[in-house]
Image: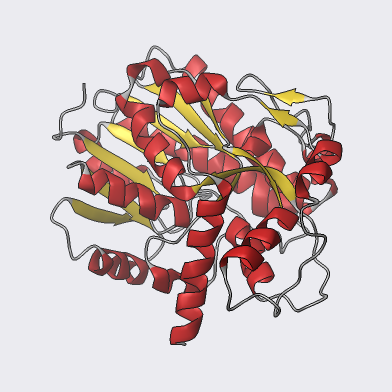
Amino acid sequence: MHTKETTVFVSGATGFIALHVLDDLLKAGYKVIGSGRSQKKIDALLKKFNNNPNLSMEIVEDIAAPGAFDEAFQKRGKEINVVLHIASPVHFQTTDFEKDLLTPAVNGTKSILEAIKKYAADTVEKVVVTSSVAALVAPVDMSITNLVVNEESWNRDTWESCQATAVFAYAGSKKFAEKTAWDFLKENQSSVKFTLTTINPGFVFGPQLFADSLKDGINASSGIITKLVHSKVGGRFYNYSGPFIDVRDVSKAHLIAFENPECAGKRLLLCEDLFCCQQAVDVLNEEFPQLKGKITVGEPGSGSSFLKTNSCTFDNSITKNLLGFKFLDFRNCIVDTASQMLEVQNET
């Protein structure tokens, strides 16, 4: 059992998911060491957490650089018992998929595991890697209605085939980064003692931990909701669909992933249900009188029939049993996401 003397390292600590994880770890009494890309980002983050004495930070400028985590682990490795590797590149504004998405994701995972092996082989007992549903199923297969995706599934794209588009390359980057972690553990079993768990969330919605984060840009999934909140009457929207999960549940799962010994060696598929943008539009129109009549309506009520003919199925009963808590539903998740967006918008 982990005592509160346990120290947890969180890579990419300034990100959307990671901030919630930091908050949950600190509330649970853990000591936390986070990594951020610059002193400026680190100072801002420490201030947000009121300079909590249990939180300290190290600079890791570029997770894709060779030996990116060496300095941080050389300095702090002997203190670290748990590593949550959350940092990974997410952006689609690129045509050099290998350089900007695939290689950084793989190298970032490799370099943090190498740093553990070099400087913290005796102290780190648990590693949790934040992967994605994208590692389980290729984007092109998401719409196969008779396909069932579960914790054992793998995206069938190859390094070559996933370079067709930025979205395919992002999905591929999650697959190959996760494969890298499992392969590393297999190859280095005699020189490290940690167990590995991966967390594979679908589209992650939910409020930012700090509302003012919305002023600095937004994670890719929440960006979909922003567009709908700012849509126009009669406006068309792309009906994104897929599995969704609330960020607060993703955060909780990161803690259980290392606290519950039964999660060792497992992949946790985080999905409450399927969603499509039409359903989000319905929720926005039903729950926000200030938006009704000002934003798009699409075809109200057509969401579930759209999903029946456009989406594969996800079975994560193994994960739900291991985690042992109920995920937040879509309506609550979208209401909380949009309320925060509207609040911040009114302040600016």
The reply, left or right, for residue 56 in relation to residue 330 is left
Determine whether, in the image, residue 345 is placed left or right of residue 38.
right
Image side of residue 267 versus residue 9, left or right: right
Identify which residue is drawn at 70% across, 42% down. Answer: 171
Residue sitting farthest toward the top: 190
What is the x, y in percent for residue 158?
78, 32
Q: How is the image coloured?
A: secondary structure
Q: Position of residue 167 (x, y in %)?
A: 75, 50
Can residue 92 be seen?
yes
**Residue 285 sits above or below residue 322 on the image:** below
Residue 102's image quarter? top right
Q: Is residue 2 above or below residue 64?
A: above
* Residue 115 relative to residue 106: left or right: left
Front residue of 71/108: it is: 108
Query: How far across and down, in percent of the image, does residue 328 sit?
Result: 48, 43
Residue 184 appears anywhere in the view: no
- Quadrant containing the N terminus is top left
Q: Nearer the viewer, residue 74 or 174?
A: 174
Name the residue located 71 percent from the left edge and 39 percent from the top edge.
Answer: 172
Exactly how many numbered labels are in the figure? 0
**Residue appearing at x 82%, y 43% in the figure:** 305
In the depicted structure, whether residue 310 falls above or below residue 154? below
Residue 265's spot in the image, x, y percent? 46, 17
Residue 261 figure quarter: top left
